[in-house]
Amino acid sequence: MLFEAYHKSAPHKALALAEGMVKAFPAGSQNKSWQALLDYQKNMIRAQVLLDKKDFAMASGMLDSTILPARFDATNFFKLKVEAAQDAPAQQKVYGDLLKQTVKEPSDDLLTTLFALGAKLKKDNAQVKADIHQLLDAQAKPAKEFSLKRYGDEKTISLADYRGKVVLLNFWYPFCGPCRGENPSLQKVLKHVGLDKFAILAVNVYPAEDRFVIPYMKGNAFDFVPLHGNEEFAEKEWGARGYPTNFLIDPQGRTIYRLGPMRGEAEERRFELQIRLLLDRNERQQSRKSE
């Protein structure tokens, strides 16, 4: 997204772009989306001016009143918040907010910022990781157990078979455009993380398209586990009404994240980091048990 690229490196270009798009879309959902980005960018620029003047209290207040756009790289926002926080209580508050954002939508830059702020608060990396794991545990919900037939050999596959691995439960169907759009990204992340640590259970919700599942999987060399399903199972058991819908399940069988369609390299990396946070938390738990 051009706005996000400008936001990172050329703030005033981002502002001009948002102003132009608000004028181009005087009403409707596009207007609302761009107005939100415009308001955000104005506050970011104002906050930077206040920080340059060392008016930390005003900058902090400005940032506290700023609404972070959805699915947006929050790194610059939190870097300004960290700079504005000049005492331990303020830094602790920012740390809590940054921790929540990092767990929700992790990025390499957010993690670096979190560990650096943790160090200011006399937290070592292990303590910061423990805070991350505690927040993951707080949002965990037991995943509903299920058993479905696998395409090809018709073997019964259960969620419980994958204890010890992170699992992506993926509701899709062969002629779903957004599904086809994100599947190469899912495969890329699956390869990066490794099939020994991560599995994708791909549940086809349209039985009428059963005959296309195996050719599609083989034709694209996807390493997913394709399973028979239907819309009733997806909706009643998991609340999935649009496709693709994804649930990220930790090695203990708990649902941690509900994810929408994946778009682009930044979201691929975010997805991979979400998986690695769950793996790291599992490794820490296993090491504690062995002590």
Image: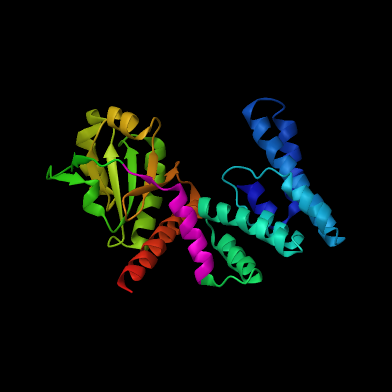
Splitting the image into 4 quarters, where does residue 192 fall? bottom left
How far across and down, in percent of the image, does residue 234 sit? 32, 33
Reply above or below: 102 against 43: below
Q: How is the image coloured?
A: rainbow
Q: Is residue 231 visible?
A: yes
Reply above or below: 130 against 232: below
Q: Residue at x 84, y 61 (%)?
A: 52
**Front position in the image: 72 or 9:** 72
How far across and down, in percent of the image, does residue 20 sit? 75, 38
Splitting the image into 4 quarters, where does residue 238 fall? top left
How far across and down, in percent of the image, does residue 114 sit? 59, 63
Q: Residue at x 34, y 57 (%)?
A: 190
User: Total label count?
Assistant: 0
Q: Residue at x 28, y 60 (%)?
A: 195
Dominant secondary structure of the residues highlighted in magenta in the image: helix
Specify the farthest residue to the right: 53
For this view, does 38 lie left or right of residue 161?
right
Residue 117 within the magenta-colored segment of the rendering: no
**Which residues are drawn in magenta?**
126-143
Q: Residue at x 33, y 38 (%)?
A: 171
For this view, does 15 lie left or right of residue 265?
right
Q: Quarter holding the C terminus?
A: bottom left
For this view, does 4 lie left or right of residue 12?
left
Residue 130 within the magenta-colored segment of the rendering: yes
Q: Is residue 269 visible?
A: no
How far across and down, in percent of the image, does residue 242 sit? 40, 31
